[in-house]
Amino acid sequence: MKKTLLHGLFPMVRAEVLRLLFTNRGTELYTRELARLSFLALRTVQDELAKLEAAQLIVSRSNGYQRFYRANPKHPLHAALAEVVRKGAAHPKPDARLVRSVRSRAGKKSSR
């Protein structure tokens, strides 16, 4: 799993579920498919889907056998969140060592 800026903004599970549901406009994915594509445990993905659905950021439907999920285009934050997810997924996550280095240099400058 490639770490992107999206993984720096959200917890890993949420970042992966959002990436899969918000970068493929109109695409529906079922629960096990989301787990397989994200390389995450099924129960972990199910828990995150429940949270996102409770927040109405995603919607689901059942065909009697599988539950399909997709981004909720009617949510007031849909366009903004889709843009953040799309752009965040396109940029690599900053190296943690570089971030610490920048922070330590900033701290030294402010103490002068």
Image: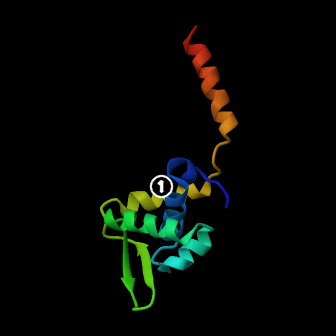
- Judging from the image, the colouring scheme is rainbow
Q: Indicate whether 102 appears above or below 20.
A: above
**Residue at x 63%, y 34% (from the top left corner):** 99
Location of residue 104 (image quadrant): top right
Q: Residues within 10 Å of mark 1 (few under 14, many from 20)?
A: some
Residue 91, position as x, y percentages in the image = 62, 52
Q: Is residue 2 above or below residue 60?
A: above
Residue 87 found in image quarter: bottom right
Residue 24 on image: x %, y %: 52, 73
Residue 68 picture quarter: bottom left
- The percent coordinates of residue 93 (x first, y second) are 63, 48
Q: Quadrant of the N terminus?
A: bottom right
Q: What secondary structure is marked by label 1? A: helix
Q: Quadrant of the C terminus?
A: top right
Q: Which residue corresponds to the image point at 63% horizontal and 68% vertical from the top-left?
A: 39
- Report which residue position mark 1 lands on: 84
Three-letter code for the amino acid on which mark 1 is drawn: Val
Residue at the (47%, 73%) spot, across then down: 25
Q: Residue at x 54, y 78 (%)?
A: 32
Say if 45 sits above or below 111 in the image: below
Percent x, y for residue 2?
Answer: 67, 58
